[in-house]
Structures are given as C-alpha cells and as structure tokens.
Image (cartoon, rainbow, N blue to C red):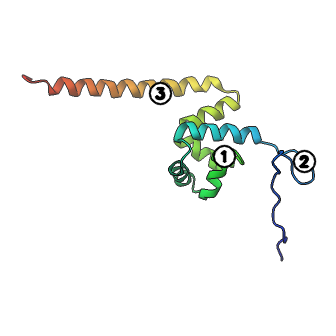
Amino acid sequence: MSFPKKGKFFPKENGTRDHGEAVQGSCFAAEIASALKRSLGDSRSGAKTVAAWTGANEKTVKNWFSGTYGPSGEHLVALARHSDEVLVTFLAMAGREDLMIAINLETAERAIAELLDAVRRLKDDQPGR
C-alpha cells in the first residue's frame, strides 16, 4: 500500500478546497477559537494547557486557537470539561441557552462559598477571640 505523493489538500484562503467545495464548520472553528482565547488568552502557555487537557498535538491546538480548524468531538468534550467558555459557546451554538443558567448558578454558588470562607477566616483572625 502506498500513500499519495501530495498528501491531504487544505483549504485555500478563500475557504474553498482545490476543487471549489466550500469548507464546512469554519464558523464552528472561529467560535471555539474565540472561546479558547477568552478562557486562556492567546499565548503559547494556553496552547500547552489545552494540549495537556486534550492529548492533542500542540500544532493541532494552535490551529484551534487560530480558527483554522475546530476540534473533533472527543477533543471538544475534553475542552468543555475544562473550560466553561468552551462549554457555554458549545451550548449557545446548539441553541441550548437554557442550560447555561445552571452553569451560571453553579459559578455563583462557588463564588458565594469562597466569600463565606474568607469572611469566616477574617472573623476567626480577629484578636480577642
């Protein structure tokens, strides 16, 4: 069995393949790229973090950050597991904004619990107690 000499063909800058077929999912890739940048910034360390989360190659992850390509289903699940930004973006693209309310409530509950812990520590640190 031999491999083709030219390998895979990639989309041109205008978003079409060599034979004129439109590339699907460019909106998906751009949305995920925006979510990753909001979550981790646009730095090398962010790409390394995402590579560790997903097990994907760092070059592949950089393509996600640039919006050139989007993650596969397995990688998208790993991203959503680690990044609320990616999860919220995915739910919005799926038209499931109602589920975002539960995420926001969980985040608010976590923040309130941390605030209560900080108040209790301050209270315990007061002299005369």
Q: Quadrant of the N terminus?
A: bottom right
Q: Nearer the viewer, mark 2 or mark 1?
A: 1
Left or right of 50, for residue 74? right
Which residue is tagged 3? 106
Query: From where the camera sits, is residue 105 visible?
Result: yes
Q: CA distance from mark 2 to mark 1?
A: 22 Å
Mark 2, Cα crowd under 10 Å, few <14 / some 14-19 / many 20+, is: few
| Residue type, label 2 | Glu
| Residue type, label 3 | Glu
| Residue type, label 1 | Ser
Query: From where the camera sits, is residue 83 visible?
Result: no
> Residue sitting at 35 percent across and 26 percent down?
113
Q: Residue furthest right?
A: 19
Q: Position of residue 44 (x, y in %)?
A: 53, 51
> Residue sitting at 76 percent across and 41 percent down?
26
Which residue is tagged 1? 66
Q: CA distance from mark 3 to mark 2?
A: 43 Å
Q: Are marks 1 and 3 in contact (CB under 8 Å)?
A: no
Q: Residue furthest bottom?
A: 1
Mark 1, Cα crowd under 10 Å, few <14 / some 14-19 / many 20+, is: some
Relative to 24, say whether 122 is above or below: above
* Nearer to us in this view, 113 or 59: 59
Q: Of label 1 and label 3, which has the lower sequence position?
A: 1
Which residue is tagged 2? 21
